[in-house]
Amino acid sequence: MQKEKTYQWHKIAESLSDIPFAANQMAEITVEGKIICLVNQTHAVQACYARCPHAGGNFADGYIDAMGNLVCPLH
């Protein structure tokens, strides 16, 4: 029998304007000791691990390409 995943939600801001997005519409925040990259795309905010698993670059210093993909600054 497969164990059901559980999630723990963390409130990070009262409103979207409270998040310090840079000009590239990305922000880096720390939640429970973990560094997270937030991406403010049209109609959605998404979160991911802050570092590229391939090159180790800081995603918040990267960009969103024309297809909507998060691109590491080292690529």
Image: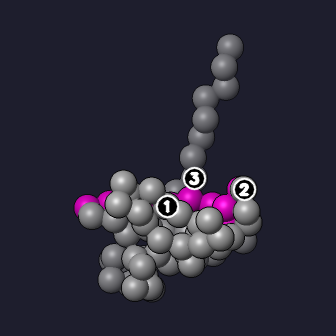
Taking the spot 66% from the left edge, 20% from the top edge, the residue there is 2
Image x and y of residue 37, in percent:
55, 69
Quarter where residue 1 is shown: top right
Question: Front-most of 2 and 44?
Answer: 44
Q: In the rendering, which numbered label is found on residue 70?
A: 1
Q: In the rendering, which numbered label is found on residue 46?
A: none
Q: Is residue 44 left or right of residue 4?
A: left
Residue type at tag 2: His
Image x and y of residue 74, in percent:
65, 70
Report the number of numbered marks: 3
Mark 3 surroundings within 10 Å by alpha-carbon count, few (fewer than 14), some (14 through 19), many (20 or more): few
Image x and y of residue 18, in percent:
38, 84
Q: CA distance from mark 3 to mark 2?
A: 27 Å
Q: Is residue 2 left or right of residue 26?
A: right
Look at the numbered discs 3 and 2 and tell me whether their residues touch, using CB distance below 8 Å.
Answer: no
Residue type at tag 3: Gln
- Give the structural element (helix, strand or loop) at label 1: strand
> Can you say whether 5 is above or below 22 in the image?
above
Question: Front-most of 22 and 54?
Answer: 54
Dot 3 corresponds to which residue? 8
Taking the spot 36% from the left edge, 54% from the top edge, the residue there is 67
- Give the structural element (helix, strand or loop) at label 3: loop
Residue type at tag 1: Leu
Q: In the rendering, which numbered label is found on residue 54?
A: 2
Residue 50 appears in the figure: no
Mark 1 surroundings within 10 Å by alpha-carbon count, few (fewer than 14), some (14 through 19), many (20 or more): some
| Colour setup of the view | one colour
Indicate yes or no whether the magenta region holds residue 24: no
Taking the spot 33% from the left edge, 83% from the top edge, the residue there is 17
In the image, the segment drawn in magenta is 43-53
